[in-house]
Amino acid sequence: MQVYLNGAYVNSEDAKVSVGDRGFVFGDGVYEVTRVVNGKFFRENEHLARLREGLAGLKIHVKDSVLEQIPEISRELIKRNHHTEGEAAVYLQVTRGSAWPRTHTFPDPPVKPTVYLSSSPFTPHTRLHQTGVDAITVSDIRWTRCNLKTVNLLPNTLAKQQAKDAGVNSAIMIRDGVVTESPNANIFGVKNGALYTFPATNYILNGITRQAVLEVAEDLEIPVYFNPIRLDELFDIDELFFSGTTTDIQPVTVIDGKPIGSSQPGPIVKSIQKGYNKLLYT
Amino acid sequence: MQVYLNGAYVNSEDAKVSVGDRGFVFGDGVYEVTRVVNGKFFRENEHLARLREGLAGLKIHVKDSVLEQIPEISRELIKRNHHTEGEAAVYLQVTRGSAWPRTHTFPDPPVKPTVYLSSSPFTPHTRLHQTGVDAITVSDIRWTRCNLKTVNLLPNTLAKQQAKDAGVNSAIMIRDGVVTESPNANIFGVKNGALYTFPATNYILNGITRQAVLEVAEDLEIPVYFNPIRLDELFDIDELFFSGTTTDIQPVTVIDGKPIGSSQPGPIVKSIQKGYNKLLYT
């Protein structure tokens, strides 16, 4: 497998960054994961726009000429890795770059950012999309700039591992008594035919798939309320589902061992799945 | 300059980790910084104990035989870098290691952790210890496992940079209306001859220097209250100071442009500095 790192395509085993890279010592960087279907990048512009937002949020200055190369690099990468047919995912990470000595403040003058891309084959979780998954509730212990898609991902990895250790698929993160996100997906609830989801504030990542769900809901004339689901309402809702780039639209049918709705994927999530698949695959 | 990386001493320019290292893609690791004076490591056992706590907190399993080598590696490193005389600092970072494909859950079976150490000459901020420094208040936007010394340090770097951009030395982080920490130091307030500091909960890092300050205070019979300083009390206190491995004991004399106490380092911080220097230098 080849990856792209700072201007060169190299074998993944040879792709290395300095121990002085601020991605390594501070988690000082942002990332994106983009789905690719038969060589077609899904919502690429949206991912690139969010990348720019994240870089601006962290004040990492990357030349426009570098950012503008990303689509071309991504295509070259999937070509080299034979990911142009079938499904794939392209991972992209940009960090503030490598600097000595290690100081909390940004390198002054700025250093060259580290740009890293990889591609991998992707298998959608089709069976789980049909059966639904189980989850546990956990505290959302993240910082309060969750709108930035940074590589400071420890709370997410710990929550996902906590779910795995509990023998379930994922976690429902709760902050201040309301549902925010899963460790790697947004969350929608369904009640009386309407969608409920946490508003796109600093407490969640405004997912590209989340935004696609909103489009699908509009097409289907399903009302959407940007109100978070309260923990005390969670077990009274009709349906719940995750949305995410590698998650797609994933019904959640059991939380903390208790059924959500009928404990089967419901009619609303099925219609959202159908609409989303149309966007993704055509 | 040489650094230690996964079993070898290499030139810092050649010290590289895989782009698959979970330190790079998730900030999935912990670190320590230890002061070295004329080859003597200050509070080394305390740093190593906290390292073990952090590894346990993240469930990163490092063989005892590896951890037990750290003092020897540290000594060899400062020897190679000619840091055995005068002052130096040794940086140590352990990550969960490199794993493909990238998944939030921990690699199963576990991979070999990445162990990285570097040493650098250190110049104490002696003049600032005498004059005091200024700071701004900022929101403490960190996650709620601040007791773990992880490399998920974005909120800290952003706060420190915010201070620099504001033309001041550092930041006083406020969570829920009370003072927690600076981006890289603990905070003590002084009122009527007693110390006030945030208790060692999940909201602060329990600094090694903080613990030394508590010992010095006990020696000097200065009462200590583990009560956080409320923002509304901040400008009525007599003195305020930072404590940290590279900060030492640092008076803060101006916050948000307003004087703290007499706007000069006060008698209590001076006595703490004296006691701390005795611990560090003898």
Image: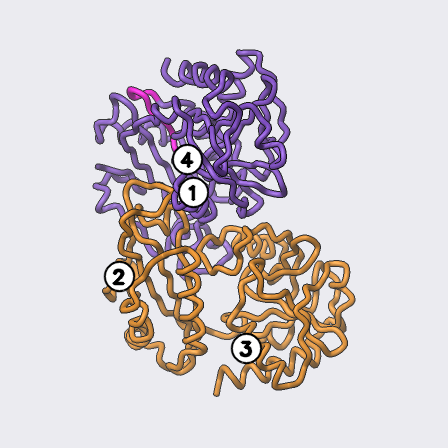
Chain colours: A purple, B orange
Query: Pointer 3 indicates a residue of which chain?
Result: B
Q: Secondary structure at mark 2?
A: loop
Q: In the rendered view, would you say A43 is above or below A198?
A: above
Amino acid type assigned to the residue bearing label 4 in the image: Glu
Say which mark, if any, is on residue A32: 4
What residue is drawn where x is 47% and y is 47%? A155
Span shown in magenta: A33-40
Q: In the rendered view, would you say A275 is above or below A104?
A: above
What residue is drawn where x is 73% and y is 79%? B193
| Tags 4 and 3 touching, CB below 8 Å | no
Q: Secondary structure at mark 4?
A: strand
Q: Nearer the viewer, mark 1 or mark 4?
A: 1
Residue bearing the label numbered 1? A163
Residue A228 visible in the picture: yes
Distance between the Cα atoms at labels 2 and 3?
32 Å
Q: Do marks 3 and 1 share a chain?
A: no
Which quadrant of the view contains residue B203? Answer: bottom right
What residue is drawn where x is 33% and y is 20%? A40
Residue bearing the label numbered 2? B6
Distance between the Cα atoms at labels 4 and 3?
43 Å
Magenta region, main secondary structure: strand
Point out the image quarter for the C terminus of chain A: top left
Q: Earlier in the sequence, mark 1 or mark 4?
A: 4
